[in-house]
Image (cartoon, rainbow, N blue to C red):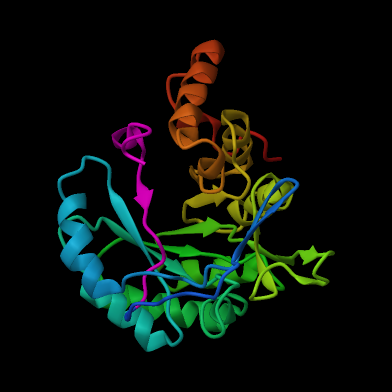
Amino acid sequence: MSGLCDIQRLGAIICKGTTLAPREGNKQPRIAETPDGMLNAIGLQNMGVDALIRDKAPLWAKWRVPVIVNIAGERIEEYAELAKRLDGVPGVSGIEVNISCPNVAAGCMEFGSNPASAASVTRAVRQATSLPIIIKLTPNAADIIAVAQAVAGAGADAVSLINTLKGMAIDIKKRKPILDNITGGLSGSAIKPMALYMVYLVAGAVDVPVIGGGGIMTAQDALEFIMAGASAVEVGTATFINPAASTDIIDGLKGYMRESGLQKLTDLIGNARR
């Protein structure tokens, strides 16, 4: 991405989901386009935390933009161990705890769907690291407000939402699901209205900062999330269409501020709340 846009202009970069051991992820095909986004069932393919610390963190330490490591596990002990290993590593500025990935057989969303288990993971990570921790919430929880309140009470410094929604696609010629995993996580413009509503709900229910994500493609999208109560936004799927989407959004936010006579973007946080 650094060859396609100025990544140093970003507020932070969140790296690929990282596990204790390397993972190959799910079998192909594992990505499918949809009319307004995409389905992915990557299955947390990654190099593992030891390789990340050895090969990636030294590069990040040279950057001005902070890097936050997203971590995932199948057991609470794995989350705690990951946080412990990353604590104090130069180049790692924070941890995003993935308790919401829908594309793995065990862990992640199982923890994020229940307030008690989500709090347990948060507490274990909090005890294992001095780094700031963000808990990434699943939209597939029965009560996302209860989960958000539980992790905030267990020591989360912030929450981010939403992760992808479960979905599928079928190849009518082959008469079978397109994804080998059958289901995948739906992201992109299609989920924005749901994501925006959930951010609105959670921002009014917790005292920690909320980071909004889900279908943010333009500066207008980002502004909607900020006005709903988000203190920051995450951009993902948009970069598959336009690698410079994040910096384009920054330019758009600055333009809006100039037109509106605003000195600080924080003045917009929660403006649309009643």
Magenta span has 14? yes
Magenta span has 59? no
Q: The N terminus appears in which quarter of the rendering?
A: top left
Marker count (numbered): 0
Residue 147 visible at all: yes
Residue 88 visible at all: no
Residue reaching furthest to the front: 173
User: Range of the magenta residues?
Assistant: 1-19
Q: Position of residue 65 (x, y in %)?
A: 27, 42
Which sits in the foreground, 195 or 153? 195
Residue 25 lies, with reference to residue 16, above or below; the image says below
Residue 118 lies, with reference to residue 196, above or below; the image says below
Magenta residues, dominant SS class: loop
Residue 243 lies, with reference to residue 184, above or below; the image says above
Q: Position of residue 222 (x, y in %)?
A: 57, 36
Q: Residue at x 50, y 63 (%)?
A: 136
